[in-house]
Amino acid sequence: MVDQDVLVERVLRAVEQVPPGRVVSYGDLAGLVGIGPRQVGSLMRHWGANVAWWRVTNHAGDFPADLLARARPHWEREGIEVKPNGLGCRIAAYRVDLEQLARDYACATDGLGGSDTAG
């Protein structure tokens, strides 16, 4: 089992690898880190304020209305357009290259420990 602090750090480092103008889903991060999407969401809710949280959406690229309102200025700066239904972005158009993300994440977490997150 991985220490909670290490798990938080792994999730935050994964988010830090998502470049401006790109998004990733909670599920994408969960697969990368080796935990569930809801756990990623919980960790982001509690510790994600100092990373680019607006780049992490649900599987459809959506946010709840209040979170989308806070994300929109960031998205505008990064060139992420809100889809016509106003719920989020077209994740297929803005999703990060998951293979590149995995490589960047591996480098960012090298030596961090806790690689066996499946527990």
Image: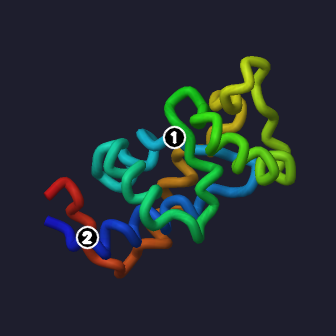
Residue 52: x and y, percent?
63, 60
Quadrant of residue 80 within the rendered picture: top right
What residue is rendered at 23% in x and 60% in y? Answer: 117
Local packing at callout 1 (Cα closer than 10 Å; few below 14, some 14-19, many 20+) is: many
Q: Residue furthest bottom?
A: 111
Quadrant of residue 87 within the rendered picture: top right
What residue is rendered at 70% in x and 50% in y? Answer: 70
Relative to 89, 8 lies left or right: left
The three-letter code of the residue at mark 1 reads Ser
Of the 4 image quadrants, the one containing the N terminus is bottom left
Residue 84 is marked as: none
The three-letter code of the residue at mark 2 reads Gln
What residue is rendered at 54% in x and 45% in y? Answer: 98
**Disc 2 versus disc 1: distance between alpha carbons?**
21 Å
Q: How many marks?
A: 2
Local packing at callout 2 (Cα closer than 10 Å; few below 14, some 14-19, many 20+) is: few
Q: Which residue is mark 1?
A: 25
Q: Secondary structure at mark 1?
A: strand
Color theme of the render: rainbow
Relative to 71, 11 lies left or right: left
Q: Which residue is mark 2?
A: 4
Along the viewing direction, whichever of 66 and 87 lies nearer the viewer: 66
Quadrant of residue 8 within the rendered picture: bottom left
Residue 95: x and y, percent?
63, 38
Residue 57: x and y, percent?
56, 40
Q: Secondary structure at mark 2?
A: helix
